[in-house]
């Protein structure tokens, strides 16, 4: 069932496995907002209603609820949210997507990314928030000749002198906004947060680890990095030595437990490059487990986006998260 709900500072679009709670608190909202939202979300909501995650890969079959939120952050953005049915509070999982540098590509960016992977985490008990970065989808408006510029950020600059560090920290800061927002909403356990990222989103997750936010107990990075496949050429990184150096800088500050997952046929960040990054990160004191899995599909970089990959990576992630939960329990004794 799909419904629109106005609640304090956000508009909520939801598809659930159950009937909605009492509607007595619903309020009318502006007709223009409803019309625009209906147009924007028509394809997304039909997708949510018509698909399901792979049951065999789910850790526990519990009822979950899928929603589309507008997050009133300093840079407002849409987010796909999936969580167990109920009032919570729940542990929080944030999922960071990759980057598209071309504004046309960003305009076609899907509203719901990594849906099957997000559902897997929700079925494990997490409230999962997958924000659509500012400047993607409907907000990818960039017409310089008319003086119109979108709010896309996290560019690395020119390959001759890329700024990998600040590009990662920019998205890491968004993660901190999201943690603060949902903690204020009393829907999550603010001391039980994990962050998952893919590609540039994975790089942002590595950057976040260097800030050591106390709320974040674990970080999982899939195919993390920046500057991959310059000019569309496989294994052609923008500035690999500078990427490794930036990773080392993060490692000197990072103490948050991390899991890095790469595939043998990732042509954005090859095994040779990702191993260099991990060595540099660990040498500075960073705590990251490195996992290289066999080739997957035609391009291993997009592993987390495939429902067929869940049986491959989910046991690795489960063991990692279980270990962090055990460590946390030991510290509390």
Image: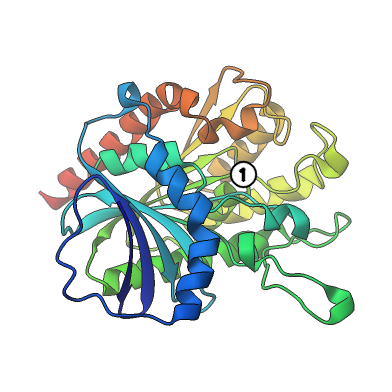
**Image spot of residue 24 (x, y percent):** 16, 74
Instruction: Say if residue 177 shows up in the picture.
Output: yes
**Image spot of residue 88 (x, y percent):** 17, 58
> What's the image's color scheme?
rainbow
Instruction: Give the structural element (helix, strand or loop) at label 1.
Output: loop
Q: Quadrant of residue 20?
A: bottom left
10 vs 323: above or below: below
Between residues 22 and 330, which one lies in front from this camera angle? 22
Question: In this image, 128 relative to 199: left or right?
Answer: left
- At a point 24% along the width and 44% down the height, the residue shown is 17
280 vs 206: above or below: above
- At a point 26% along the width and 72% down the height, the residue shown is 185
Question: In this image, 185 relative to 315: left or right?
Answer: left
Q: Quadrant of residue 25?
A: bottom left
Between residues 64 and 333, which one lies in front from this camera angle? 64
**Residue at the top extreme of this rendering:** 294
Q: Residues within 10 Å of mark 1 (few under 14, many from 20)?
A: many
Give the residue pinned by disc 1. 199
**Image spot of residue 198 (x, y percent):** 56, 44
- At a point 26% along the width and 39% down the height, the residue shown is 124
Question: In this image, 281 relative to 122: left or right?
Answer: right
**Image spot of residue 94 (x, y percent):** 41, 54
Instruction: Say if residue 180 shows up in the picture.
Output: no
Between residues 45 and 79, which one lies in front from this camera angle? 45
Q: How many marks?
A: 1
Q: Quadrant of residue 268?
A: top right
């Amino acid at each position: 069932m799909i419904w629109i709900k106005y609640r304090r500072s956000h508009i909520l679009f939801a598809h659930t496995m159950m009937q909605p709670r009492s509607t007595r608190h619903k309020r009318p909202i502006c007709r223009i907002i409803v019309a625009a939202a209906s147009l924007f979300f028509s394809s997304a909501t039909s997708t949510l209603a018509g698909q399901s995650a792979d049951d065999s890969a789910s850790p526990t079959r519990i009822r979950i609820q899928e929603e589309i939120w507008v997050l009133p952050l300093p840079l407002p953005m849409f987010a796909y949210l999936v969580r167990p049915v109920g009032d919570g509070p729940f542990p929080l999982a944030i999922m960071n997507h990759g980057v598209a540098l071309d504004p046309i590509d960003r305009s076609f960016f899907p509203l719901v990314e990594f849906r099957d992977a997000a559902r897997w985490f929700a079925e494990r008990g997490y409230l999962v928030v997958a924000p659509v970065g500012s400047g993607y989808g409907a907000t990818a408006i960039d017409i310089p000749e008319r003086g119109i510029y979108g709010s896309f950020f996290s560019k690395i600059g020119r390959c001759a002198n890329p700024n990998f560090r600040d590009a990662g920290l920019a998205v890491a800061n968004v993660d901190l906004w999201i943690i603060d927002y949902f903690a204020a909403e009393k829907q999550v356990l603010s001391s039980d947060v994990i962050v998952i990222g893919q590609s540039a989103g994975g790089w942002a997750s590595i950057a976040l680890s260097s800030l050591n936010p106390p709320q974040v107990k674990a970080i999982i990075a899939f195919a993390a990095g920046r500057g991959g496949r310059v000019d569309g050429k496989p294994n052609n990184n923008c500035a690999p030595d500078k990427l490794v150096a930036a990773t080392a800088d993060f490692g000197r500050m990072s103490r948050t437990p991390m899991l890095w997952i790469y595939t043998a046929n990732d042509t954005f960040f090859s095994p040779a490059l990702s191993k260099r990054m991990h060595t540099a990160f660990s040498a500075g004191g960073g705590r990251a487990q490195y996992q290289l899995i066999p080739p997957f599909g035609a391009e291993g970089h997009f592993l987390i986006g495939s429902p067929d990959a869940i049986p491959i990576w989910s046991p690795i992630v489960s063991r990692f998260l279980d270990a962090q939960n055990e460590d946390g329990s030991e510290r509390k004794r």
